[in-house]
Amino acid sequence: MSNNAAAPLPTETPEWQTLLTLSASARQMSIHQQFENDPQRFDKFHVAQNGALFDFSKHLITDEILAALTGLLSSCGFEEKRAAMVSGEAINLSENRAVLHTVLRGTGTQKEGAQEFVKTSMHSMMWITNKIRTDNTIKDVIHIGIGGSHVGPALAYDALKNVADGPKLHFISNIDGAFVKETLSKCSPDSTAVIIASKTFTTQETMANAHVVKDWISGTQNLYAISDNTDGAQSFGVPADHILPMRDWIGGRYSVWSSIGLPVAIAIGFENFTHFLRGAADADQHFLLSPPENNIPVLMALLGVWYRNFMDYRAQAILPYAQGLAKFPLYLQQVDMESNGKSVSNQGAFIDYKTGPVVFGEAGTDAQHTFMQCLHQGTDVIPADFILFKNANHDLHGHHTMLNANALAQSKALMDGQENQAEPHRHFPGNRPSSTLILEEQNPYNLGLLMAFYEHKIFTQGAIWGINSFDQWGVELGKTNAKTILEALKAENTSIKTDSSTKSLLSHLCGKNTKNL
Ligand code: F6P
């Protein structure tokens, strides 16, 4: 079964009913008690792989639940869907596109020309990287892009600052003039390279920001572009040999491995960038070859489906205990929510079961002093992923130990709770599930591994839910409205340089014409 549309929906499988039945007893289950009953629980419910340790013992699961979840996975055609993705079939049905971010890190495909394209574009990327890194006049790089053309590189730069020895990176994404002005004030037009990253080269925000920065930089010798629309980039004024091409089989939110990663390569050097790709490639091999009960992304996905569809939990907290990963929740918000925030099956029909959760998070320990209250004592149960690094990449070792102690303390508090009926405000119900993912240290390889684990988790959930994780039609209506409203506001204010009047803004808020107010 290679056709995504032909696989049964999860609710049509026998395991769906089994899991519904099991969820009734799971609601009474005590995780703590499970540990008491089975001293081997941690041994059974953890996976060690490529230097990563994934502990999923603190969850509301048993062997029986896990077996039913892996049964569900297989009944939904997961193996066939996974094989279809990596072989280059057009599994993005609504856009008739292949989904091949894996080939960018060397995981093979049968799609004609794909490997050749990757080889050529990596070569050009390396050339531009080395050209900019060895040009002593370039001190800063401004990367202009939004969504998938921004968040991955911005995350990777933050996470890998400890190995960044190239020009300083700045990112402009939002269409907020103050943000653009502030960024430009930190750089000089003579010593800055500018990268315009847009797969389509039509995105309103990116194009508007790119025009301002192009006027600021004067001349095109330090102007670069990454796009699937090379004609658009050339007409904009980017020199032909400064344009890195994309392909339609590289989804925006899965594109940091492609030439979209150029600013990261410039900051950390091409060799470090290849370590980043190697981490992701190793995650691919693990995902493709390991059985479900030993497969980190698959287990993450099964736990998510269990909570979303059978325990009725609505959110997922992402808690990296590393400041460099502060943007990881934001990155996952796009990868997860833009991929699996869907209500239509691959058969093109509305579905009647839940799909992707609300994903949110923050770097620990900041999270502890903001929203963790709600995870400990709120009325919703919110499963959490704690992400830790075993070793510090700095010499404040005491800080690192304190950071990790806090992460472990939070997961223990969530699970154990604390009885206090006399003072209910001090009562912690406990039994709140969490995973812990421990990586060796913060470096390019482990960042690649981590990001690819989550990509594959999201793919696996989409495969179970029978949805298309690779389109994003839900963003279109707002974009169209913005264009219409912009035209109307411009017409009313005669010049784009004039701010919108309160009256004209109100008219659109009320859905009325100004004349009717
Ligand atoms: O917000 C929708 C979206 O299409 C994202 O999927 C994409 O990452 C982003 O816009 C940017 O698109 P582009 O790279 O074409 O400018």
Image: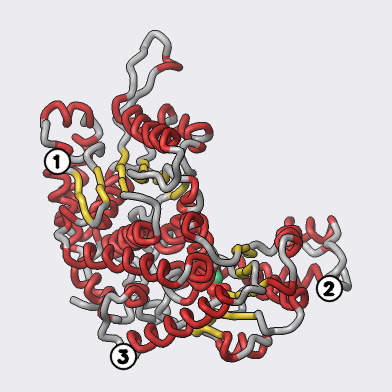
Callout in the foreground (1, 2): 1
Q: Which residue is mark 1?
A: 43
N-terminal label among 1 and 2: 1
Identity of the residue drawn at 36% across and 45% down: 389
SS at badge 2: helix
Residue 171 position, x and y percent, is: 61, 63
User: Can you see residue 458?
Assistant: no
Q: Which residue is mark 3?
A: 112
Left or right: residue 320 versus residue 278 is right
Identity of the residue drawn at 34% across and 19% down: 418
Mark 1 surroundings: few (<14), some (14-19) or many (≥20) residues within 10 A: few
Rendered-image quarter of ligand 1: bottom right
Mark 3 vs mark 1, CA separation in Å: 44 Å
Q: Nearer the viewer, residue 447 or 397?
A: 397
Identity of the residue drawn at 31% across and 90% down: 112
Q: Type of residue at label 1? A: Asp
Q: Which residue is mark 2?
A: 491
- Where the C terminus falls, by quadrant? bottom right
